[in-house]
Image: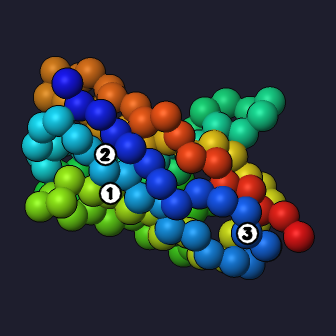
């Protein structure tokens, strides 16, 4: 069983930065695609960024140029560096890992609030 533990959320002013971190516990997930979703009130959950085990990266259009996803397979972590944050980035952010059989494992989420 895999447990994903997120950290790094918080309150930040518009234009500020935050780094979210996700650590996978329980097994080696270095070959699994991982990513970050976010879910804001009255919106649908959306994929923000993802990274495969070999480092191929995808970003949602709103994240391009502002967010950077990275992973450290030795540590079992995936980070999301978020710069130039906007109020519309306010959401709960969830780490996800997809196993070879398609099963998705989710973290409990970490809240990001962008407000002055």
Q: Earlier in the sequence, mark 1 or mark 2?
A: 2
**Residue 39 appears at what percent x and percent y?**
64, 37
Check the image and report above or below for 101 versus 64.
Answer: above
- Rendered image quadrant of residue 55: bottom left
For image coordinates 74% across by 78% down, the residue present is 15
For image coordinates 84% across by 64% down, the residue present is 115
Label 3 SS: strand
Label 3, residues with CA under 10 Å away: few <14, some 14-19, many ≥20: some
| Marks 1 and 2 close (CB-CB < 8 Å) | yes
Instruction: Classify the position of the N terminus by image quarter.
Output: top left
Q: Earlier in the sequence, mark 3 or mark 2?
A: 3
Distance from Cα at disc 3 to Cα at disc 2: 25 Å
Label 1 SS: strand
Q: Is residue 66 left or right of residue 107?
A: right
Q: For residue 5, say whether it is visible.
A: yes
Q: Which residue is mark 3?
A: 12
Q: For residue 61, say whether it is visible.
A: no
Q: Which residue is mark 1?
A: 78
**Residue 105 appears at what percent x and percent y?**
33, 29
Q: Earlier in the sequence, mark 1 or mark 3?
A: 3
Label 2 SS: strand
Label 2, residues with CA under 10 Å away: few <14, some 14-19, many ≥20: many
Q: Which mark is residue 34?
A: 2
């Amino acid at each position: 069983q895999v447990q994903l533990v997120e950290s790094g959320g918080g309150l930040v002013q518009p234009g500020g930065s935050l780094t979210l971190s996700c650590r996978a516990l329980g097994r080696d997930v270095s070959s699994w695609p991982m990513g970050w979703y976010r879910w804001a009130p009255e919106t649908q959950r959306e994929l923000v960024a993802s990274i495969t085990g070999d480092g191929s990266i995808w970003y949602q259009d709103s994240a391009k140029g502002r967010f950077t996803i990275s992973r450290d397979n030795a540590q079992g972590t995936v980070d999301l560096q978020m710069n130039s944050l906007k109020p519309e980035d306010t959401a709960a952010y969830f780490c996800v890992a997809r196993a070879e059989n398609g099963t998705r494992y989710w973290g409990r989420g970490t809240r990001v609030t962008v407000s002055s």
